[in-house]
Image (spheres, rainbow, N blue to C red):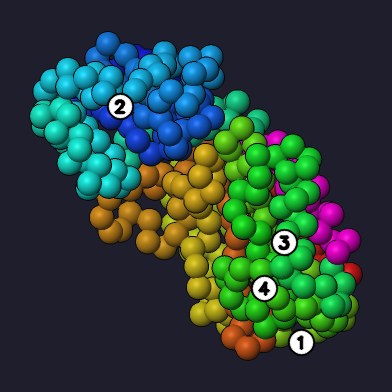
Amino acid sequence: MPPVQDLRELLERLGLDALYITKPQNVRYLSGFPHPEDAEVLLTEEGAFLLTDPRYPEAERESRLPAKVLKREEKAALLSGLRGRVGFEAAHLPYARLMALREMAPVEWVPTEGAIEALRLKKAPEEVEAIRRAQALAERAFHHALTLLKPGVRERDVALEIEYFLKKEGAEGAAFPPIVASGVRGALPHAGASEKALEGGELVTLDLGARVAGYASDMTRTVALGQVDGPLKEAFFAVLEALESALELIKPGVEAKAVDARAREVLKARGLDRYFVHSLGHGVGLEVHEAPALSPYSGQGPGPHLGLVLEPGMVVTVEPGVYLPGVGGVRIEELVLVTEGGIELLSTLPRGWQAL
């Protein structure tokens, strides 16, 4: 959590008298409260405090911020005391809820976007440590999953085993539903695990992450189930080259979109760039997908453009892929901490060709 003085300066920069924070990840970032979906943070010139309801009588102990456990009418009375310009998170707060807030507090409600997310771009050491722990659990789950990859086993069963393993070993849970995509389904970048049975002679893509203390990890490996040759093996080594070339470029001061461009250049030289259909990477923290984006579109479109240039403390994925329709696909993903001198790989699994 940033110092309270920094939050007061944030209010001043935004020209606000208060900021009402409702996005769960932002609430947890500021407060550490483990039930952020049922809480808000109110930031005023006097300081910041957590608002929640009587279901959480121990909120004061669980929150880094002073906590107020309020019934509905008590919360309405507190908010009715607000004055001036009060910001809200436009990308998160539903319109109906905003209308209810306006009834409780007839002040000027001002839409904001990306204010707290900008503070979350660079991870503090304790945040990086939580991500490390999540990644270590994910890698143990990956090794467990490898023991299950045999012809006849359903993708869905492998994914369920991953989720069970993560919880059993101490994670809050999977950071996202694990992707287990085999054979032709590997050509679907976000293929959910299906009833399809694994077959010999095909590639299997495993994309998984854990969640620890609210923080996520994310990694992908593609392995061969038996003998795999031809275009899929060629695609694998093209993706591997694109990944390694992109990793070499990452350091403070480099534009995020330049890293994406580097990977595409490598794939273009192999005639495979048109089969790379998503951005190269994304930030990871309290959300699996957050700023900065390693994308050709960084800096374009509406909304705040966060993390256009890489800085020490940012945690990002680097995940080139090639997806051949009707044939299969390859994705290899590393989890990376940007450091003063370049990068530290938070993912430690071998990324070379692996046949089971």
Q: Amino acid at mark 4?
A: Ser
Q: Residues within 10 Å of mark 1 (few under 14, many from 20)?
A: few
2 or 3: tag closer to the N-terminus? 2
Spot occupied by residue 274 in the image (x, y as percentages of width and height)? 51, 80
Q: Amino acid at mark 3?
A: Ala
Q: Residues within 10 Å of mark 4 (few under 14, many from 20)?
A: some
Alpha-carbon distance for marks 1 and 2? 64 Å
Q: Secondary structure at mark 3?
A: helix
Left or right relative to 70: residue 254: right
Q: Amino acid at mark 2?
A: Arg
Main SS of the magenta part reads helix
In the displayed structure, 62 sits above or below 196; it is: above
4 or 1: tag closer to the N-terminus? 4
Q: Nearer the viewer, residue 36 or 261?
A: 36
Alpha-carbon distance for marks 3 and 4? 9 Å
Tag 2 near tag 4, CB within 8 Å: no
Which residue matches tag 2?
72
In the image, is residue 142 part of the stretch drawn in magenta? yes
Which residue matches tag 4?
194
Alpha-carbon distance for marks 4 and 1? 25 Å
Spot occupied by residue 153 in the image (x, y as percentages of width and height)? 82, 73
Spot occupied by residue 175 in the image (x, y as percentages of width and height)? 61, 48
Q: Is residue 54 visible?
A: yes
Q: Which residues are magenta?
A: 131-148
In this rendering, the count of numbered labels is: 4
Q: Which mark is residue 159?
A: 3
Q: Nearer the viewer, residue 211 or 284?
A: 211
Q: Secondary structure at mark 4?
A: loop
In the displayed structure, 315 sits above or below 2; it is: below
Residue depicted at x 17% and y 29%:
104
Q: Nearer the viewer, mark 2 or mark 3?
A: 2
Q: Which mark is residue 230?
A: 1
